[in-house]
């Protein structure tokens, strides 16, 4: 079975009102865990590869590993560049056959972000690839000026609905990563905080009202940083800050219902893998066979992915729609 195009996965996810898990791949065990869980759940999946993953594992190894995963499973699999930081990197991935790329120029001023995205879009669309752009800054849960009154501030950290329309129309990107209080990594929030779901609704509606249809939105930084994993890591010798919290899974479920089509999860996979390895080392200090600690690590990631696709993203059972 060849790769499935990101465009087709998006179209089905929008129609079926579920979200696609976009899970980061850095090595064989992570990849096996993700695709085995999705195969068992009959869930379509997006595998995403960052610049750092390409530097760590080598693009050829990653490509061949994914080819193996595609040939050994029956579920639809798309391959996406996560946080592409230049036209050149995006072009490399497009030329390698990625079905989508993200060009992340969200740190640039609006017009420059548009210009950079447009250049990638022009190349990608000539080569059967689709593009994700990002507008706004992933600073974490905070209130942008005017947020409480519903009069969202222009040029703030969070994505503004009107700017989203202008950005999508001018850049031509096929999906949009939004900033609504989401943030990357294991230390997102202290205590429980929430996504600005009203703003997400407003962005979705604005794009639809502007004639852009049921436009696919993307949620980065969607790890929930499960407390039990943090405690497990620390129980077995880790020193992670325990007063940390991620995006509540209940918020992600609402975001999915509003129309977030792609949900990016990396940190939770790392936590699951680390917890299992630390436990194995602590309980078996004489162990030195990597297979002995990487097997439970793979199982930890697999259980986590299964939970996400089944209970949070609700894409289980949609592989063959
Ligand atoms: O959002 C970033 C992803 O978690 C990828 O992280 O650049 O360390 O591979 P990375
Ligand atoms: P997390 O750090 O919350 O897992 O976010 C991952 C991500 O956004 C990858 O692009
Ligand atoms: Zn991200």
Image (spheres, rainbow, N blue to C red):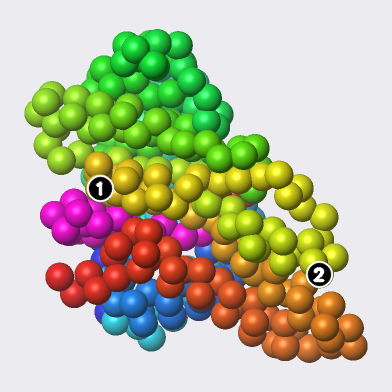
Q: Is residue 69 left or right of residue 124?
A: right
In the rendered image, residue 307, in percent from the top left (x then y), is placed at: 44, 68
Q: Are marks 2 and 1 in contact (CB under 8 Å)?
A: no
Measure the C-alpha gap from mark 2 to mark 1: 38 Å
Q: Closest to the observer: 92 or 158? A: 158
Instruction: Look at the image and tell me in which quarter the C terminus lies.
Output: bottom left
Tell me how many marks there are.
Answer: 2
Number of residues whose C-alpha sits closer than 10 Å to that of mark 1, classed few (under 14), some (14–19) or many (20 or more): some
Number of residues whose C-alpha sits closer than 10 Å to that of mark 2, classed few (under 14), some (14–19) or many (20 or more): some
Q: Is residue 154 left or right of residue 278?
A: left
Q: Is mark 1 within 8 Å of ligand 2?
A: no
Q: Is residue 238 above or below residue 236?
A: above
Q: Quadrant of residue 204?
A: top left
Instruction: Judge whether residue 92 can be spotted in this image.
Output: no
Instruction: Look at the image and tell me in which quarter the N terminus lies.
Output: bottom left
- Magenta run includes residue 7: yes
Please give the residue where the numbered disc 1 appears in the rendered image.
257
Secondary structure at badge 2 equals loop
Q: Which residues are magenta?
A: 6-24
The furthest residue to the right: 286
Please give the residue where the numbered disc 2 appears in the rendered image.
236
In the rendered image, residue 33, in percent from the top left (x then y), is placed at: 51, 76
Secondary structure at badge 1 equals helix
In the rendered image, residue 176, in percent from the top left (x then y), is placed at: 32, 36
**Along the polypeptide, which appears first: circle 2 or circle 1?**
2
Q: Quadrant of residue 295?
A: bottom right
Q: Is residue 12 above or below residue 144?
A: below
Q: Residue at x 54, y 56 (%)?
A: 266
Q: Is residue 15 above or below residue 246?
A: below
Instruction: Judge whether residue 18 can be spotted in this image.
Output: yes
């Amino acid at each position: 079975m060849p790769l499935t195009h990101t465009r087709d996965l998006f179209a089905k996810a929008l129609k079926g009102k579920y979200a696609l898990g976009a899970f980061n791949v850095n090595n064989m065990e992570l990849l096996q865990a993700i695709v085995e869980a999705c195969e068992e759940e009959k869930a379509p999946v997006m595998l995403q590869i960052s610049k750092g993953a390409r530097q760590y594992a080598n693009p050829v190894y990653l490509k061949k590993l994914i080819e193996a995963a595609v040939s050994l499973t029956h579920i639809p699999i798309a391959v996406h560049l996560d946080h592409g930081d230049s036209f050149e990197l995006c072009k490399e991935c497009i030329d390698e056959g990625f079905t989508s790329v993200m060009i992340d120029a969200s740190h640039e001023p609006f017009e420059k972000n548009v210009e950079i995205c447009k250049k990638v879009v022009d190349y990608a669309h000539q080569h059967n690839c689709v593009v994700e752009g990002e507008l706004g800054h992933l600073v974490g849960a905070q209130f942008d000026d005017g947020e409480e009154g519903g009069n969202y501030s222009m040029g703030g950290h969070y994505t503004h609905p009107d700017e989203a329309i202008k950005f999508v129309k001018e850049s031509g990107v096929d999906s949009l990563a939004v900033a609504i209080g989401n943030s990357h990594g294991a230390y997102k929030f202290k205590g429980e905080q929430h996504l600005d779901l009203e703003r997400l609704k407003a962005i979705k509606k604005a794009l639809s009202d502007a004639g852009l249809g049921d436009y696919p939105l993307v949620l980065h930084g969607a790890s929930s940083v499960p407390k039990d994993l943090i405690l497990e890591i620390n129980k077995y010798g880790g020193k992670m800050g325990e007063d940390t919290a991620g995006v509540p899974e209940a918020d992600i479920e609402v975001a999915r219902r509003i129309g977030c089509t792609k949900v990016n999860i990396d940190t939770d996979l790392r936590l699951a893998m680390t917890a299992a390895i630390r436990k194995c080392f602590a309980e078996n200090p004489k162990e030195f066979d990597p297979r002995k600690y990487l097997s439970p690590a793979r199982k930890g990631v697999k259980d986590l992915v299964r939970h996400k696709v089944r209970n949070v993203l609700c894409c289980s059972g949609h592989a063959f729609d």
